[in-house]
Image (cartoon, grey):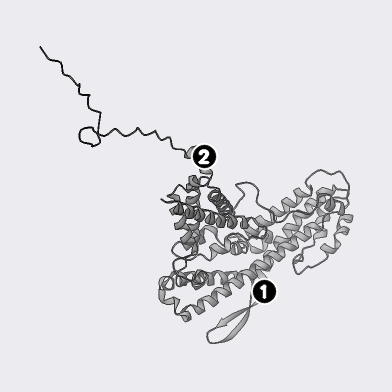
Amino acid sequence: MNAWTKFFLILLRIAIGWHLLFAGLAKFAPDYRGSEGYLQEATGPVAPYFHGMIGDKVADRYAVLPVAEGNDPASVSHAKRCPVALAREWDSYCNEFIAHYHLDEEVHDTYSPANFAASTTGLLAAENGGILVVAGLDQPRILRAGLPDGGDKSKLQKDYCDKTVENFKAATVVWMLYGSKPQRFTSPWGPPVEAERTPEQRVRDYVAQRERIRKAQAGELAFGLNTLFGADKTKDLLAEKGEVSRTRADLARELDTRTSRLKEALRDVLTPEQAQKYGPMPEPVKATGVTAMSRLEWIDFMVRWGLVLSGAGLILGLFTRSSCVLGAALLLSFYLAAMPLPGVLEAVRVEGYPYVNKNIVEMLALLTLATTASGRWAGLDALNPFNWRSAKPKAPPPPPDRYNGTVVKGPAPAAIPSHVPSRR
């Protein structure tokens, strides 16, 4: 291998490493939304695996728990039917809020419920868009009924936070089941029509439409090259995908609005001294501990750190072969999650060609680099003792045979004496 070949292979390694490193660093940004949207749009033969692996965060947050068979729905608290994903999110925030402002500590400071309620009259008396008011629900009375006069201030505040979260859960479940919003439906027989749909019904429509699109993309449209030149065949599918994306965004935004109002309600319980002493609560609240991380959070964690470690290893030439294999594995997963199949026009349009995109090209380049020793040519692998080869020094070649000029193989022949003594 000549010097120019080595030079350009080293440049190729550094360029790919630079790309992977900054792709990983971008995923540490506070506004990074994670890989859920990318995996939700997965196409190709392994798409069902990706879909099942991450689920659907929006649909999970709207999954109201059913009433157990034999129980009267009227006797079951609405708060107990709150979707598991949403309840876990709000409970986690409430616990972090209480811990951040030390509301779980014993503070021997009397604070009468009357004064406590007076400090939050603006919140407790406000309807706030149907969030706080539910039939028969009165937060000040609940608070006064549960706590005696002269109670501990922190205990009052902590109980208020817990009750506020429970009330928000109940009100949100009522909204999901009985709230309504006009939804526009397209009709093949005439102009679009509008109908009142509850959030629960809108989620069912969204899931059914999403599954219909996935089946269409996994069918005959996926692999036929003729779909590249027949835009009419996929025009309706693209329009339907846009409608699904808008519905998903609307559903997520409505729940995010309720989450924001819950946070405002919790902040209103603080005194100015508490708010100034501990400062604002950091957002968003991340799951703490390995066991608390969801599967999607694990995927994001491994992807961002895998890209950073692989890119840094390629730039520095440290553990170069391992970095090449790690980067190639990540790029292969990206390719399988968004295969540029002919029937998926938006995936093909990004790169311009069917079946082949930059992910597969970079993956093949990394596998090629893994077969070379570029890290020892220019990199820290030259200083890595694990890459040193304990090669034994080669013995010098034997001298040529003095009789016929050929190289003697095997042990050197015995020297022929110049005078053979006589046996006499």
246 horizontally vs 101: left or right: left
Q: According to the image, label 1 marks what residue?
A: 180
Q: Circle 2 is placed at which residue position? A: 384
Point out the frontmost of discs 2 and 1: 2
Q: Residue reaching furthest top?
A: 424
Residue at figure coordinates x 54%, y 76% from the top left: 240
| Camera-nearest residue between 23 and 408 | 408
Element carrying mark 2: loop
- Nearer-the-camera pick, 420 or 219: 420
Mark 1: few/some/many CA within 10 Å (<14, 14-19, 20+)? some
Label 2 and label 1: CA atoms lie apart by 66 Å
Q: Position of residue 361 (x, y in %)?
A: 46, 61
- x%, y% of residue 110? 89, 47
Question: Where is residue 386 drawn, in percent x and y?
Answer: 48, 38
Residue 299 at what x, y percent from top left? 56, 54
**Where's the C terminus, which quadrant?**
top left
Q: Quadrant of residue 419?
A: top left
Q: On the rendered structure, is 322 left or right of 100?
A: left
Type of amino acid under label 2: Asn
Tell me the quarter of the picture where residue 67 sits: bottom right
Q: Amino acid at mark 1?
A: Ser
